Amino acid sequence: MIKKRMMAFAAAAVSFFMMAAAPLTAYADSTPYVALGADLSQEQKEVVLRLLKVTEEDLKNDTVLTVTNEEEHQYLDSYLDPALIGTRALSSCKVCAEASGHGITVEAHNISYLTPSMYVNALATAGMKDASVVVAGPFEISGTAALVGAMKAYAAMSGTSVSEKVLDGATDELMATEEVAADLGDSQKAAELVAAVKEIIVSRNYTSEEDIRQAILEVAAELGVSLTDAMIERLIGLMHKLASLDLDAAAITEQAKGIYEELKSRGLDISKYGVSESDMDGFWSVFAGLLRDFIGWFKGIFG
């Protein structure tokens, strides 16, 4: 793993000096993508567009997608109470390609169930790179349609499709994070906990229940949180699933770097788990933004 990182870093460094004058994006098409809930009334649409900072005139040039309530239930019923998803697709999002090294940022308006950090973690796992995402509802709502919309926008922007296996892992991660948040009463710490454990198990290639459990317990101790036995088992199941997706720790850390930088500022000692400080600094550098091939490209859902 370390050898592969060093080779990738060296290649990235060479590429940087060749391309420094023209930062690249991860996408051939840099047009903003707007995914709108299919059940918005005209008045609600006006509210959402204002929050997304999009005008009707902009929509003529942007790529506009639609998310239906049927799609929400198709992809999320396995993890969410259908009542939470509801009967109307209302939350919407705008996704813009950014320069290499930007990572994923999420800004949310009128979203009551999913936090920006939860979106970032899930989208990084699904493979999104270097994008700014704005999520909005016409009033306080869960934000599930916007999650599906962001996935659809990513697939369209990158010209890929997202496999059921990867979407399942990303969605399960998001839902597990919300469950931990409810248990802890702290959404930010829940997102940080899941992100840190994910980075550790991917970096160390952990697959055994014992190793994963130890990583969960040690990160929880570092963050000063106490987990129930049921929640530990829930996280072990999630990490087993994520470990099977062949994720790249460097890419995930770069894309969700806001979360990892917050962890670093809190003093979480990732290096004790076998990830060196120099590695972590590399993840946050501009070179790490060029480490592109980190999830096998996907078949199926939005292709």
Image (spheres, helix red, strand yellow):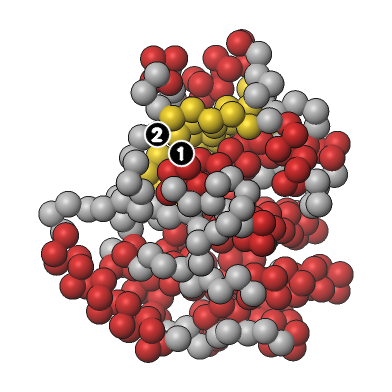
The reply to whether residue 112 is visible in this rendering is no
Q: Callout 1: helix, strand or loop?
A: strand
Q: Is residue 121 positioned above or below 267 on the image? A: above
Amino acid on which the number 1 mark rests in the picture: Val
In the rendered image, residue 289, in percent from the top left (x then y), is placed at: 34, 63
Q: Which mark is residue 95?
A: 1
Q: Are marks 1 and 2 in contact (CB under 8 Å)?
A: yes
- Classify residue 198 by image quadrant: bottom right
Mark 2 surroundings within 10 Å by alpha-carbon count, few (fewer than 14), some (14 through 19), many (20 or more):
many
Q: Is residue 25 positioned above or below 279 on the image? A: above
Quadrant occupied by the N terminus? bottom left
On the rendered structure, is 173 left or right of 231? left
- Classify residue 85 by image quadrant: top right
On the rendered structure, is 205 left or right of 239? left
- Classify residue 70 by image quadrant: top right
* Residue appearing at x 56%, y 77% in the figure: 202
* Residue appearing at x 58%, y 66% in the figure: 195
On the rendered structure, is 7 left or right of 257? left
- Going by the picture, which residue comes out furthest to the top? 43
The reply to whether residue 277 is visible in this rendering is yes
Mark 1 surroundings within 10 Å by alpha-carbon count, few (fewer than 14), some (14 through 19), many (20 or more):
many
Disc 1 and disc 2: Cα gap in Å?
Answer: 6 Å
In the rendered image, residue 57, in percent from the top left (x then y), is placed at: 39, 15
Q: Is residue 70 positioned above or below 195 on the image? A: above
The residue that label 2 is drawn on is: 32
* Residue appearing at x 32%, y 77% in the figure: 8
Q: Nearer the viewer, residue 111 or 14?
A: 14
In the rendered image, residue 253, in percent from the top left (x then y), is placed at: 46, 67
* Residue appearing at x 69%, y 21% in the figure: 39
The number of numbered discs placed on residues in the rendered structure image is: 2
